[in-house]
Amino acid sequence: MNALPARVLVVEDDEMIRELIRLNLELEGFEVFTAVDGQDCLDRVEHIAPHVIMLDVMMPRLDGWTAAEQLRAAESTHDCLIVLVTARAQEEDRKHGERIGVDAYVTKPFDPQALVELVRTLLDQDRGRTV
């Protein structure tokens, strides 16, 4: 077991949703950082070194699709777990996420506890691959 909590970067332009996700993850013992859009995420990600990045898709300055593509392309963030959390629920949107290589796709509205469980499951699966 890791002594340190897993770090999660929540990237969401809607403050209420961002705080809802942050609070639920913190209550479950995760170390949570936030960013207000994709550019803010890219500006801060290397300093934070998150295990999981939760990205909204529709954001100002830099959308979640583009941020996810850049995170996957960069050597320092290539292996981060990426979860898209978005109102875009069309099959083509999900396929776009698969093409980018995101690890999970969650549609809004979502159950906060289910989101926490998804993060736990992804981290457990990732530890199983890397150990």
Image: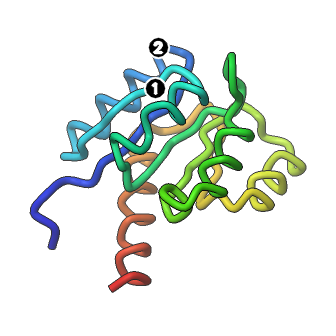
**Between 7 and 26, which is closer to the camera in this rendering?**
7
Left or right: residue 27 compared with residue 127: left
User: Colour scheme of this structure image?
Assistant: rainbow
In the rendered structure, are the residues bearing label 1 and label 2 in contact, judged by CB atoms less than 8 Å apart?
Answer: no
Left or right: residue 8 compared with residue 56: left
Q: Residue at x 51, y 20 (%)?
A: 36
Rendering coords of residue 7 (x, y %): 30, 48
Residue type at mark 2 is Glu
Instruction: Report the mark closest to the observer, 1 or 2.
Output: 1
Is 49 situated above or below 85?
A: below
Is 104 situated above or below 85?
A: below
Rendering coords of residue 17 (x, y %): 48, 22
Q: As drawn, which residue projects farthest toward the front?
A: 75
Q: As drawn, which residue projects farthest toward the right?
A: 92
**Between 35 and 124, which is closer to the camera in this rendering?**
35
Q: Which residue is mark 1?
A: 35
Q: Which mark is residue 75?
A: none
Is 98 situated above or below 24?
A: below
Q: Residue at x 39, y 82 (%)?
A: 130
For disc 2, the neighbor class at 10 Å (few under 14, some 14 to 19, many from 20) is: few
Label 2 SS: helix
Label 1 SS: strand
Left or right: residue 81 compared with residue 33: right
Give the CA distance from mark 1 to mark 2. 10 Å
Q: Which mark is residue 15?
A: 2
Rendering coords of residue 126 (x, y %): 42, 73
Task: Tell me the quarter of the image containing the N terminus.
Answer: bottom left
Mark closer to the chain start, 1 or 2: 2
Task: Tell me the quarter of the image containing the C terminus.
Answer: bottom left
Residue type at mark 1 is Ala
Left or right: residue 68 compared with residue 32: right
Q: Residue at x 24, y 37 (%)?
A: 26
